[in-house]
């Protein structure tokens, strides 16, 4: 866009090395882009060069003429609320409708399109797939105020490349995406962990208190093997999938994820929540993952459990009642 004094020479050199060149054109002299792989004028820029467009058929004809005149591999015309259309010589035009649900600010949308296209083409994607990703990226950026960027997480979620449920039981990969998206929205993420073998009132009270420390609450749950290593034979009473399903049903809990190690330190270090919470009489320096969270600028909190209620106590009560029934 004017920063290069001789784009024609640069395009010539790039073509000699078989390097693709994508151009977001400026002005009305498109001849200097002769031989480029792809140019991406908006509708106003296109009509300023090719004249008024009165129909879709005329747009196709003028686009094909421009491709021929400039020896382009393809031409992408961005069309605001009408989306964007890719024209490739000898092929049917490829139209992508606009994806934005809400438009707050179109500043930087063109820059987002060209940069996403360049990244996708450099990664080996086809022109059509690159345009699909560019269209999604533009739909994300116009939904933000001011000049904004698009993260790879936002793009992956928008493209449906990852299963990204709003809440409930998740894999570590799904959780990482959800947490990244939440942080992009400015939400404070809280994380805690435990066995939660037999969910009781003390657990519910504790999780309610933890949830109030932020906007989103993650509960990491020990797998069955991990519980047995910590609690001994006969535990857990409930398998991990059932324990997670019950936790996911609580209004205080947003995301539930399993971990197989004795402590969730690795998981916490990967997620890096804003607030790490642990129940009991721990000192902050004793809490697994606490150092990583603090080093990242987060906080670590210790919440006390409700007295007189515990999974062990419930199990002992059940055993006593059964023995009374037999006597």
Image (cartoon, grey):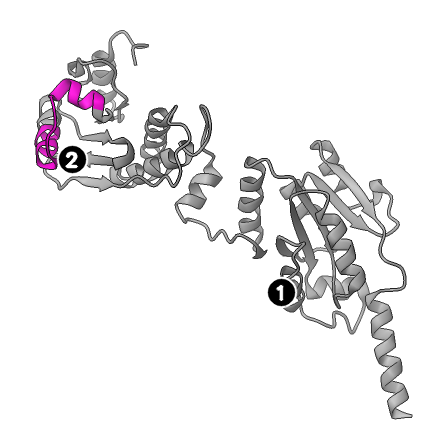
* Residue closest to the far bottom: 327
Q: In x, y percent, where is residue 298?
A: 72, 35
Badge 1: residue crowd in 10 Å (few <14, some 14–19, many ≥20): few
Q: Are marks 1 and 2 in contact (CB under 8 Å)?
A: no
Left or right placement of residue 8 versus residue 224 in this view: left
Give the SS element for disc 1.
helix
The answer to whether residue 173 is above or below residue 312 is: above
Could you tell me what secondary structure mostly forms the magenta stretch? helix
Badge 2: residue crowd in 10 Å (few <14, some 14–19, many ≥20): many
The answer to whether residue 154 is above or below residue 326 is: above
Q: In x, y percent, where is residue 79?
A: 24, 31
The answer to whether residue 223 is above or below residue 181 is: below
Front-most of residues 294 and 181 = 181
Front-most of residues 260 and 145 = 145
Q: Which of marks 1 and 2 is nearer the N terminus?
A: 2
Which quadrant holds residue 102? top left
Q: Which residue position holds label 1?
A: 245
Give the SS element for disc 2.
loop
Q: What span is colored magenta in the figure?
A: 44-64
Residue 66 colored magenta? no
Q: In x, y percent, where is residue 189?
A: 65, 42
Total residue callouts: 2
Between tags 1 and 2, which lies in front? Answer: 1
Residue 60 colored magenta? yes
On the rendered image, what quadrant is the C terminus found in? bottom right
Q: Residue at x 17, y 30 (%)?
A: 73
Q: Which residue is drawn at 30% across and 14% down?
A: 1
Front-most of residues 305 and 5 = 305
Which quadrant holds residue 202? bottom right
* Residue closest to the far top: 5
Q: Which residue position holds label 2?
A: 88
């Amino acid at each position: 866009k004017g920063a290069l004094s001789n784009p024609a020479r640069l395009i010539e050199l790039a073509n000699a090395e078989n390097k693709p060149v994508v151009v977001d054109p400026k002005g009305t002299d498109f001849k200097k882009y002769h031989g480029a792989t792809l140019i991406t004028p908006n509708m106003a820029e296109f009509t300023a060069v090719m004249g008024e467009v009165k129909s879709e058929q005329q747009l196709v004809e003028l686009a094909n003429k421009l491709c021929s005149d400039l020896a382009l591999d393809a031409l992408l015309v961005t069309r605001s609320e009408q989306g964007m259309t890719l024209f490739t010589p000898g092929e049917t035009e490829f139209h992508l409708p606009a994806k934005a649900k809400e438009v707050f600010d179109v500043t930087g949308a063109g820059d987002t399109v060209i940069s996403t296209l360049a990244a996708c083409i450099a990664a080996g994607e086809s022109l059509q797939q690159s345009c699909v990703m560019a269209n999604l990226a533009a739909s994300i950026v116009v939904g933000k105020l001011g000049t904004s960027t698009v993260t790879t997480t936002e793009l992956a979620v928008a493209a449906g490349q990852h299963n990204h449920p709003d809440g409930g039981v998740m894999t570590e990969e799904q959780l990482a995406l959800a947490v990244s998206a939440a942080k992009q929205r400015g939400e404070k993420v809280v994380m805690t962990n435990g066995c939660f073998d037999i969910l009781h009132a003390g657990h519910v009270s504790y999780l309610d208190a933890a949830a109030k420390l932020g906007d989103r609450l993650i509960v990491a749950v020990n797998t069955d093997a991990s519980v047995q290593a910590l609690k001994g034979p006969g535990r857990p009473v409930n398998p991990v999938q059932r324990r997670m399903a019950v936790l996911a049903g609580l209004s205080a809990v947003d995301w539930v994820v399993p971990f197989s190690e004795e402590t969730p330190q690795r998981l916490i270090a990967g997620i890096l929540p804003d607030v790490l919470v642990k129940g009991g009489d721990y000192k902050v320096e004793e809490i697994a993952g606490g150092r990583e969270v603090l080093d990242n600028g987060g906080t670590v909190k210790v919440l006390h459990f409700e007295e007189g209620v515990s999974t062990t106590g419930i199990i002992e009560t059940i055993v006593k009642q059964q023995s009374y029934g037999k006597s």
